[in-house]
Amino acid sequence: MLYTIENDALRCEIDTQGAQLHALTDKRTGKDYLWCGDPAIWYGQAPILFPIIGQLIDNSFCYGGKRYTMPKHGLARKLPFTLDAIDASQAVFRLDSSAATRESYPFDWSLYASFSLDGAALTNRLTVVNRTHGPMLFSVGAHPAFNCAIGDRLVFEQAETVSAEKIDKENLLRPERFPVLENARELVLTKELFNEDALILSGLRSRSVCLTGEHALKFTFGDCPFLGIWAKPGAPYVCIEPWYGVNDDPAPRADFSEKRGIQRLEQGETFSFAWTAEIL
């Protein structure tokens, strides 16, 4: 089911299936800034990634001596959320653990996805609450796709010297790194940029990046430890993905707690992060 929030500048639609952003429209121009989800290219639009990011070795992990199976990018993007609260310019959706989720992920939790409008800016905040009797291990991230054209640029807030990690054919991290920026701010979106899948960046000084072109916007990602940038090669969109977690590499780990980028919450604690897309 789709719900709509709006203000004088923007109209935003959210689907309860996965609490996925479905449209982000500038009411002044009628222009939609969010990728349409064409299944012939890529069916997604802005999936929420929880409780893992990317791929696990053999789609599984071990915790407390038991092995669990988990699909790529986790459970949340495939599950229906419930509407928790809504008014004219803000909506909050909620997903709770269940007997079914515990078959794949042995923790009790609530995940809230809030969407709020302020002028020409949309903020999506993801909040994880640990309802387990003990600590909880998780990753969480966002995967929004914005319309663009080949030749548009991503311009980082500060000059960066950074290399990217990439994934192999099994969606596991490769051991080598690939130079992306050398004391520079601009990354050109070319047809070939994503021929080897996503660019996974870490150690950025910037806290935001601007997309140039007809669908110009400023994307604020804060202090996330990983930023994924991806599109199907040559496609007219780019995903800008703040992650609190990352794909496995090929080296097996004895326990989920050893996974790179994993987050830990103690009983009753809350974790929250937000991204903002501001139309320019």
Image (spheres, helix red, strand yellow):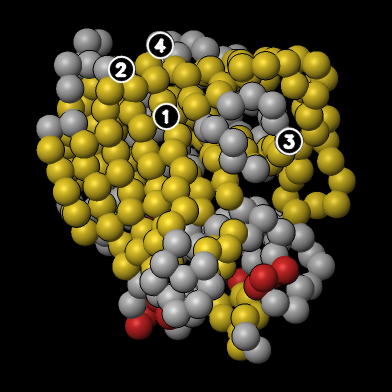
Q: Would you place residue 94 above or below residue 85 in this image? A: below
Q: Which residue is mark 4?
A: 280
Q: CA distance from mark 2 to mark 3?
A: 29 Å
Amino acid carrying label 2: it is Ala
What numbered label is drawn on residue 203? 3
Amino acid carrying label 1: it is Thr
Q: CA distance from mark 2 to mark 4?
A: 8 Å
Query: How many numbered badges does the structure rendering display?
Result: 4
SS under mark 3: loop
Q: Nearer the viewer, mark 4 or mark 1?
A: 1
Tell me if I can see residue 45 in this picture.
Answer: no
User: In the image, 190: left or right of 212?
Assistant: right
What numbered label is drawn on residue 276? 1
Q: Residue at x 62, y 75 (%)?
A: 60
Residue 46, percent across and down? Answer: 41, 42
Categorize mark 1 by other alpha carbons within 10 Å: few (<14), some (14-19), many (20+). many
Q: Earlier in the sequence, mark 1 or mark 3?
A: 3
